[in-house]
Amino acid sequence: MVHWAYLRFAAAVVAALAVCGADQASAQDMPSPFVQEVLVKSILVSLNDAVAADNFTVFHAKISKPFRDQFSPEKLRTIFKDLIEKHAVFDAVVAKPIVSDEDAKIDEKGVLRLKGHFETTPKQVKYQLGFIPADGTWKLSGVSIDIE
């Protein structure tokens, strides 16, 4: 059973990405739509698990180094406190297709930008995610989630 908190919550977390130079942007190609879906769903499920457990240690370990350096697990908990308090559960995203609100792009700083939503009920889950290349994979560098 999926529980939804009534909230319009945009927890915007933006890491300072000055450490990502333009050379990294060219080093990583645009991931396929399948890989984009895996990135989105895996990070949202990890965030869901962190909120449900009220423990951001594992989520923290999965994000990019600049993001980890800027936001400790305790700070992430504070940022997502509203979701924790309202017992938001949004793991239903794994069973739904992604609806892209904008085309995926790699910006001038080398950040992969993904923005979309899931047609979940009774509330829609909207997301904006940023990923940077690290060790041959994409790591989370920014997240905004909105449940309405």
Image (tube, grey):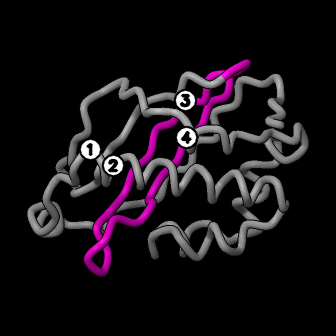
Q: Dividing the picture into quarters, in which one does residue 56 lie?
A: bottom right
Q: Nearer the viewer, mark 4 or mark 2?
A: 2
Point out the frontmost of discs 1 and 4. Answer: 1
In front of the other: 86 or 2: 2
Estimate how packed mark 3 is, as few (under 14), some (14 to 19) or many (20 or more) residues with alpha carbons within 10 Å: many
> Which SS class for mark 1?
helix
Magenta segment: 121-148
**In terms of sequence position, does the residue under pointer 2 or pointer 3 come before the other?**
2
Indicate whether 9 appears above or below 38: above
Q: Which residue is mark 2?
A: 36
Q: CA distance from mark 4 to mark 2?
A: 16 Å
Q: Are marks 1 and 4 in contact (CB under 8 Å)?
A: no
Relative to 29, does residue 11 appear above or below in the rendering? above
Residue closest to the eye, 87 or 118: 118
Specify the label residue 126 is tagged with.
Answer: 3
Q: Secondary structure at mark 4?
A: strand
Left or right of 118, for residue 132: left
- Point out the image quarter for the C terminus: top right
- Tell me the quarter of the image containing the N terminus: top right
> Which residue lies under the disc numbered 4?
144
Residue assigned mark 1: 33
> Are circles 4 and 2 on residues that touch, CB within 8 Å?
no
**Mark 1 vs 2: CB contact within 8 A:** yes
Residue 100, numbered circle: none
Q: CA distance from mark 1 to mark 2?
A: 5 Å
